Image: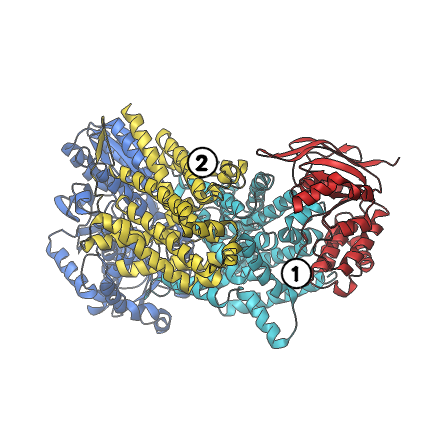
Chain colours: A cyan, B red, C yellow, D blue
Amino acid sequence: MQGSMSKDVMTTLVVSAALIWALPLMVSTYTLTILIIYGMLGLSLGLIWGFGGIICFGQAAYFGLGAYTYAIAAINFGESTIPMLLAVIVPAIFAALLGLMMFYGRLTDVYLGVITLVVMLILFKFINSTAGPQYVIGNARLGGYNGIPGFQTLNVPGDPSAYIWGDAYFYVCAVMLALVFILVSALLRSSFGRIAVGIRENETRMSLMGYDIRARKTILFSIGAAIAGLAGALFANWSEIVTPSLFSLRQSAEIIIWCIVGGFSNRVGPIFGAAGLAYIKILLGQQSMVDNTLIMGIILVVFVLFLPKGLVPAVAELWNISFGRRKRGASRSGRRVRNRGKANG
Amino acid sequence: MAEIVLETQGLTMRFGGVVAANNVDFTLHARELRCLIGPNGAGKSTFFKCVTGLQTPTEGQVFMRGEETTQWMSHEIASLGVGIKTQNPNVLDSLSVFENIWLAARRFHTPIEANRKSQEIIERLALSSIARADLGQLAHGERQRVELGLVAVGDPWLVLLDEPAAGMSAEDVERMTEIIHELNKSAAIVIVEHDMQFIRSIAENVTVFHQGSVLMEDHVDLVMADQTVRNVYLGKKA
Amino acid sequence: MDLSAVIFIEILYAVASLIMISAGLAVVFGMMKVINLAHGEFMMMGGYTTITAVNLGVNVFVAMLIIAPLIVGLIGLVVERLVIRHLYGRLIDTMLATWGLSLFFIGIVTMIFGNTTTGISTPIPGFTVGNYQINGYNFFIILVAIALVILLYAVLKGTRAGLIARGTMQRPDMAASLGYSPDRIYMATFFCGSALSGLAGAVLAPLVGLVPTSGAAYIAKAFITVIAGGPSLIAGLVSSSTVFGIISQTFSFAVSPVMGEVALLVAAVVLLRLLPQGVTGKFFKGKL
Amino acid sequence: MSLNRRTFLKGTAATAGAAILPNILSAAGDTIKLGSVLDTSGGFDAYGKPMEMALRLAVSEINEAGGLLGKQVEVVAYDTQSDMALYSQYGQQLTREDKVDVVHGGILSASREAIRQTMRKTNTPFFYNVLYEGGVCDRNIFINGVTPAQQAAALVPYAMEKTGKKVYILAADYNYGQITARWIQKFVEENGGEVVGVDFFALDVSDFGSTIAKVQTAAPDLVIAPLVGGAHLSFFRQWAAAGMKDRIGLASTTMGVGNEHKVLTAEEGNGIMVAYNYSQELDTPANNAFKESWSAAYGDSSAIHELAVSHYQGIKTWAAAVALAGSMDRDALINAMESGLSIEGPAGNLSVDPQTHHAVLDVHLMEIENQGMRVIETLPQQQPIDTQSVCDLQANPDDNTQYEIEI
């Protein structure tokens, strides 16, 4: 249990370095960048839902908040370093306040899901109704439904005219994801992370052990929001425009779907789920024979029927069957999610 | 006389029109071992929940080592050094025995200290052979024992147990009895229990609950011999 | 004076339409703890069924009240047998599956009907209140909602199936222990839930611009209403619809429809903060 | 029912070959590559699908006539699935990987802004062929949709004359709606009228009961409703359901651009006043020929709408400019476009305004009648005066702004 953190870091570094080197040979860096960003977004929900048991139907709220914070700050500051920091801090604070409200109100389970969903919809409706000229923050018009285009994109800290874009931006995003992944791994290995998993398993027991689950859930929720906010800021830099659709129900649903497909409760599942599904969507857009909504629907239904545990756990299981090494983490995660479902039913 | 570690004054709990606990005055001294008995619905579980912070009483007060804890939440009470075990085995099913106990130990110790402490408890409770197994795979008796481990690892001065012997084999009960006596060397213990056999084997003093109130409080043998108590039990259970 | 009568009717209508759009989801969630993300698409298909039936010469009321629920119920049945059945007790897997199904239905309906399908006009003329003209069809929706609530109550309270259903809601394992096949209970429930969604979509069809993607507009609202209602099916549905309907319509009149929707959402947050188990988690406990 | 299954399959079958194989063909390098980004599935497909059909039709006509500069035009098309992020994605893919010669596409203003800068940076000429709020000033983009001033200048006086002086505006709450509302207001006042109320609605509002009551409290003679999208269609239905149609006049600057008037029943839609560049009922030789070739390609012509025709005309304008320039060079193309180029499209004569890169075109005043648009009057060759008041690309070729026009 102890001591393997450094091994974990090494593995992450080696694997991500290999991927960063190999993937651009197959897929354009521009496409890879967005896949990485979605992967980070998936990871943010995987962390709080998979490891913290916080059912969040509104993760898009923090993604959108990060993107908007970045865009607004970048217009006002004319450089990108402070806006990047703000894009992480603002969603984290917002989520912490919401978390205080929710967790100290003893909201649990599906009721949490509804509150997070509703808060996201409120943000969505608010941002959507800011088309008028009176909605201005500093020099930035909020722009309502059309969003905010034309803000300063990522630059070398201290030099606003040295833009980081194209391939360089891909490397920045890839390194960011690897860093976030290592931080999440470290978090999960720390006492805090293990206590969080304990809380997911059995809140009453953990509170009878003397842990303040409200505070811990709030902190975890806030960390998840910070990661989503970072993903949002990276997205803003990638797309060079932010629109309210970042806050939309559809965006939130997609994040959940990524995590389910990749498998909750393991760190890489949500990342690969997100990147995989987003890539399928991008590929689908190149054909116009059959309605793409229909194809995506069929893929998801077939998936849930034949790979019910999620992609990564399924692959891990296949690996175990083939090589006969028992890996508890993977097989356990699948079961846990099912159990939760049963507890609700 | 030893220090009073747990005291309630006029503790009352109402659910709508139903009075589940009615004006309960209760006192427990350091290193005392007390069983709460009574027929189903007598109010002992409600009393237990009010004391452990799982519910907030409608009226009355709870004191632990003289400090009022009436409005406290479970984790605050547990943080005082109170070990609590609820009615059904309440453990972390998908984690191993070691991980369960480690999490309980971590609350009061540094990670390294927690490792040592967990190891020690596992040995003391004879759980070494199953230390790496997930709780979900264990038998009922083993799970109960692990939960006692969770309670014991925090070195509590007050232990509150709700039906620790329920559904266990005779062998398991015997082991449980040993552990409880061991705990009792340093902690006062309250046990809510049905099983008279078990109570006789473990306790000296019992408190009898009936219809939300304390009916009687005395040595176990005297209580067992009491006609009112017998009526309550037989009347209810027949 | 006239205006307040109009406002009163619009509030009643808002409550009624919330009840209508949430009923199907409430039944499925209440009985099976399945969050049916394709709920909106079932409504959408109810609308399309009605339009098709009317175009084929069927009386509009027959189409809305009988054919649409039946057809959509049958679609629900097929879906339940083919997909949902395999996923009981797995909350998030059913979410994934029903999300996939919702995309699937949008695609299928687009392929069959295209995206500009002529709707049907309201079968009831406008209505004059003093100086105001209001939508006469509102009264029809209010009546249907009342009938729906009474019917649900009668079925749950007065029939054997209702008794089994109530048992299942409280203890999923109880029905099985009484010798009823949970499989069949779930199948019947999903049929009823889908039929109710179809009914709602059909009844609302003359008032909305129906396109294959219309369903998305309903799912969030229905979900919020159902969860805020809490564990009791009918009492929860009626109470949360009433609270939300009154609040959203009041703000719509006082400020704007957008504020009406925001007010509804804020009310949901406040409500759940004060009553973490929904309205009926605190009041009307143990009622239907 | 405009797009039944049979015609849909036919339509897609006709385009399938080109759609599947873009990357293979592109290896040849002896074609002109036209990039397309449109929402042909998801919530905005009612706009996007007919636009895609128009694009295929225009390109196959160009190719049948021998192509451009002796080369065939090859379409590289992406379906953005009504997802804004995919515009950014495919915009990059078109310019960086497919290296197309021109991009036609974008539907919502946000989608245009998502790709406009990419097109500018990569020197890829960009055609945005959609009715929009006006004000974009960028030498790299050409826009041929009608703008609010072009519409409102025609629609407002006509509708006021027919109904009365008191006007209530119900607009979609985004750029287009906000700006259009201001232009309507200006023209109402110029015509001696009075605006008694303005309300904005987010695009997902679908319940207008309270609004209809509010409008009645203000008792206007005319309601002008630049409402957008599927949810807002509910307004027109609820308006009719309340029996308001015969009491207060109704006009719109958006209703029908995506064939919305075919979703309404005849009795709900009849009498709504609109003003666009195109109507299916336009009885001109050019339009009849266009409808015929559309029918020949796709079975029937009912899917054609304003945006599809704009798109068709945009591609035809581009083709004319390429022929005139005689090369695929971007600057040569822009110079050709700015040379006062004009084409005869299904909607009439259309010429490029060199000052703004917008279009000078005919605006038709129409009334909806039996799910069609009956043309009442044609206002020939309307200038994009709104954009002209802020944008002069001849004087400032480096301008790269979307102006919000002060009125």
Task: Identify residue for label 1.
Answer: B136
Residue A136: mark in rendering? 2
Residue D338 visible (yes or no): no
Q: Tag 1, which chain?
A: B
- Left or right placement of residue D115 versus residue B18 in this view: left
Local packing at callout 2 (Cα closer than 10 Å; few below 14, some 14-19, many 20+) is some
Residue A58 placement (x, y as % from top left): 50, 48
Q: Tag 2, which chain?
A: A
Q: Are marks 1 and 2 in contact (CB under 8 Å)?
A: no
Q: Amino acid at mark 2?
A: Val
Local packing at callout 1 (Cα closer than 10 Å; few below 14, some 14-19, many 20+) is some
Q: Which of A191/C198 is in front?
A: C198
Residue D406: mark in rendering? none
- Left or right placement of residue A82 versus residue D383 in this view: right
Q: Amino acid at mark 1?
A: Gly
| Mark 1 to mark 2 CA distance (whole Å) | 56 Å
Total label count? 2
Residue A61 placement (x, y as % from top left): 50, 46
- Left or right placement of residue A344 versus residue A216 in this view: left
Quarter holding the N terminus of chain C? top left
Q: Residue at x 61, y 65 (%)?
A: A330
- Left or right placement of residue B68 versus residue D251 in this view: right
Mark 1 or 2: the one toward you: 1
Q: Residue at x 33, y 47 (%)?
A: C200
Q: Residue at x 66, y 46 (%)?
A: B237
